[in-house]
Image (cartoon, helix red, strand yellow):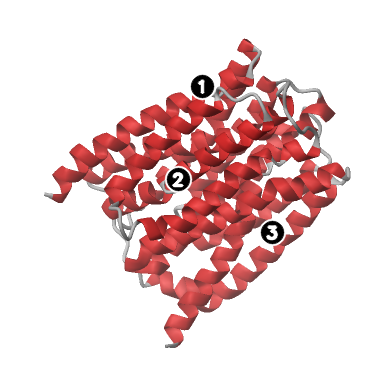
Amino acid sequence: MNRIFHEKTSLLIFYIAIVLAGVGTTILGPILPALSSQWGMNDAHAGALFTAQFLGSALGGLLAGLHPVRSAITGFITAALGLLLLTVASIHSAAPVIFGYGLGVGLVLTGINLTVSRLAGDKRGAALSWLNFCWSLGATICPVVTAMFVARHVLNGFLIMLSVLYVISAIVVLTYSKTYVQTALTEVPRTGTAPISIRFFIIYFSIVLFLYVGVETTLGGWLSTLANRLHHASVVGAFAISASSFFWLALLIGRGISPLLLRKIPETVLQPTAVGLSVVSICFLLTVQSFVGVAIAGSLAGLSLAPVFPLSLSFFLSHAGQSRSVGLVFAICGTGGAVLPWITGIVSTYRQSLQWGLSVPLVAAVLMLVLSLNYVFSVRLRTDS
C-alpha cells in the first residue's frame, strides 16, 4: 500500500512538472511577434530562434538518457537561467540564450518521460498518455497567459515568474527523488547494447518522431504570426497571439479522449488514421484567409495530431524496452522542432507568404503517413507474427 501511494505521488509530481515544461516548450511562438517587432527580425531570423531552442532541446534529450531524474532537476535550473537571461537579451545574444534555455527544456522533457515510463512499468501506455495530456495543458494555456502579459507590456515579468516556478519544481523533484524515486528506478533492470533489431526501431522511430515534433512545433509556433498577418483577419494584436491556443487546446482535448478511443479502436488503426487526418487539416490551413479560418484549421490539426506522439512513442518503447539508446531517439526527434520551423521561415521569406512556408509541415506529415502505414502493414505484422 505504501509503495502504491509513493508511486502515485511521484507520478503526480511529474505530471504537474510537465505542465510547466509544456508552457516552456511552446512559449517562443507566442512571444515571437513581440520579439520580432522589438528586434526588427524577418521570418528567416525568427525561424532561426526555433532552431536554436530545439537544437538545445535535442542535446538535452541525448544527455538525459543517462540519469533521467537528475537531468530533470538540472533542466529546470538551466531553463530558469535561460528565461532570466532572455529578459536582457538582444538580437545578437538571443540565439545562444534560447539554445541554453532549450537545453534545459530538453533535459526536463526527456528526463520526466523516461522516469514516468520506468515508474509506470506495464502501465506505461496509460501513464505516457496522461503525461502528454498534462504537457498539452501547459502548451494550451501558454499563448493565452503570454498574450495577457504582452498586452500589458510586462513580458519580462512573466518570464521571471516562470523561472521562479522552474526553480521551485527543481526543489520539489530533488526533495522527493531522494526519498523514493531513485530507489524505485534502481529496481528497474536495464539492457546493455541494443541488438540490431532494436537499432532498426531506433532509426525508424527517430524519423517518425522527428517529423512529428517538427510538424507540431511548426504549427504551434507559427499560427500566432499567421493570424496576426492575414489581411482579412477579423481580430489583430494581442488576441491574435492566442491563435495557437486553438491548436494546443484541440491537442489537449484530443489527448484527453484518445484513451477512450483506444477502448474501441486498436492502436495500429488510430495512429495512421490520425496522421492522415492531420494531412487534410494542414491542407485546409494553407487555404484560409481569416482568423476564424486559422482557428478552425488549427483546431482540426491539433485534434488529429493528438494521438500520434504517445502512440508512436508507445510503439517504439514496446520494442526498445529499457535500452540505453532510448535517449538518442528523444534527441533526434527534438531536432525536428529545430529544423522544420526554420525551413518554414526560410520558405516564407523567399515566397513572401507564410502559408507557402506552412507547406513544409504538410510535406512532413505526408512522409509521416507513409512511414506509419509501412509500420502497421509491414513491420508490425511481421514482428507480431
In the image as oriented, which residue stretches furthest toward the top?
A: 351
* SS label for mark 3: helix
Please report the residue visible at 33 percent of the width from the left and 58 percent of the height from the top. Answer: 322
Task: Give the amino acid at mark 3.
Answer: Tyr
Residue 16 seen in render: yes
In this rendering, the label closer to the viewer, 1 or 3: 1
Q: Which of marks 1 and 3 is nearer the N terminus?
A: 3
Picture disc at residue 166: 3
Picture disc at residue 118: none
Residue 58 seen in render: no
How far apart marks 2 and 3 lie (CA) works out to 21 Å
- Residue 338, x across and y down, in percent: 55, 32
How far apart marks 1 and 2 lie (CA) works out to 25 Å
Q: Quadrant of residue 161?
A: bottom right
In this rendering, the label closer to the viewer, 1 or 2: 1
Residue designated by label 1? 359
Q: Would residue 294 be found to the left or right of residue 383 on screen?
A: right
345 shown above or below 292: above
Residue designated by label 2? 330
